Image (cartoon, rainbow, N blue to C red):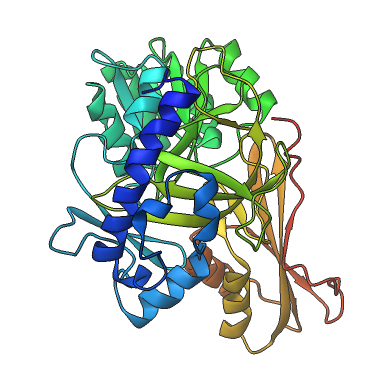
Amino acid sequence: METRSADERAADLARQLPNLISCAKTSVPALDGLLPEDSDSIRSVEDLVRLPVLRKSELVRRQSENPPFGGFWALSLSDADYVFQSPGPIYEAGRIAHDWWRLGRFLFACGIGRGDIVQNCFSYHLTPGGIMFENGARAVGATVLPAGTGNTEIQVRAASDIGATAYAGTPDYLKIILEKSDEMKLELTRLRNAVLSGGALFSSLRQGYEDRGIACRQCYATAEIGNIAYETVAGEPMVVDEGVIVEIVTPGTGIPVEPGAVGEVVVTVLSEENPIIRLATGDLSSLVPGQSPCGRTNARISGWKGRADQTAKVKGMFVRPEQVADIVSRHPEVHSARIVVVRENEMDSMTVKLETESTDPSPYSLTVREILKLSGKIVLCRKGELPKDGKVIDDRRDYGDR
């Protein structure tokens, strides 16, 4: 599949898409009336533009009205092996089935397989990241150490004792593990691969890992969709996964941008078991012409270029404008809030600025942690001190150096 010609891929899509649309019409209640009566009329990527775009805000709204899935997943609770809750909240269903999220293809491209021990540092708590990467590692025959996040000293000891050969997790957390291993004087000599997601892999961070002999590759995946695109050659554009169709559209619309232009990523999942039609991710990227030097022939994207709205990803977690509003609503004495995100010592750093007459930051720290699932520095400001520019999340990280 990965080395098909463009004509072969188009012919396969012409067969798959009518079946996908037909299946979605009967198994996804929320799409009832939104898809064409004639399923055969949708046979190419270009035909998809006639279909509506599903936005995550609509997903949240419909799920709140009709919990847990809002009629958007073909899977019922009894069919699901897992139910996850992502920030929003958005509920997703998952299966134990072989390579359900298609991450095995990414790990295989990184050279991971039988005989490897993957230290899986994605979270196993509520959100699906940990299970997603475990499912992919098992698909290629690797052994998994289900480490999750935190307990860094214990993680370093386990990686050393067991001889972990690969790390799976956010780009930043690997740096914490390596620095702790230096402090503990425990060499992780077998660690040679890092499969990364959930945050930007800055070029300086990648170079630091490679200087230690750790090859880094990153993928672009979401909780609802699974794997979307992935690096096969370090620093090259990401190859689109064979199980999805990626469109790049003008933000807020379903209309494709000019070739090579930056726009919002919209994804269709080619799974009749759980079809997803034109889900807008809110992420920005662009299609890159040409073919990967690895020999894979699918379309390529330039990687993550920020958000179509003010949403930012901090330490692998999305921070959304509505969450900032929730922080303000919890405290009547707070007039307004602004979150500032920067990079410090190759790590994401978050500051929460609050306009309030209060002088005690401790109650706000608890609220921020509860709502954002992240900790950050609290700065109390006088009323009128924050800019009145409509911005509630100020992401100051430089995404050009990646």
Q: Is residue 240 or residue 56 the one in the foreground?
A: 240
Query: Which quadrant would the C terminus be assigned to in this image?
Result: top right
Q: Left of 35 or right of it: where is 301? A: right
User: In this picture, is 192 found above or below 336?
Assistant: above
- In the image, what residue occupies the spot 56% across and 67% down? 368
- Res. 326 image quadrant: bottom right
Residue 103 in picture, x, y percent from top left: 36, 33
User: In this picture, is 343 found above or below 64?
Assistant: above
Q: Left of 224 or right of it: where is 401? A: right
- Extreme-bottom residue of the structure: 332
Q: Left of 209 or right of it: where is 114? A: left
Task: Evaluate whether residue 249 shows in this view.
Answer: yes
Q: Total of numbered circles in the picture?
A: 0
Residue 34 in picture, x, y percent from top left: 42, 70
- Extreme-left residue of the structure: 78
- In the image, what residue occupies the spot 61% across and 26% down? 237
Residue 208 in picture, x, y percent from top left: 62, 19
User: In this picture, is 57 found above or below 281?
Assistant: below
Query: Which quadrant would the N terminus be assigned to in this image?
Result: top left
- Res. 166 image quadrant: top left
User: In this picture, is 3 found above or below 28?
Assistant: above
- In the image, what residue occupies the spot 83% across and 72% down? 386
Q: Is residue 223 or residue 146 the one in the foreground?
A: 223
Residue 3 in picture, x, y percent from top left: 42, 17
Task: Evaluate whether residue 126 shows in this view.
Answer: no
Q: Is residue 386 or residue 271 the one in the foreground?
A: 271
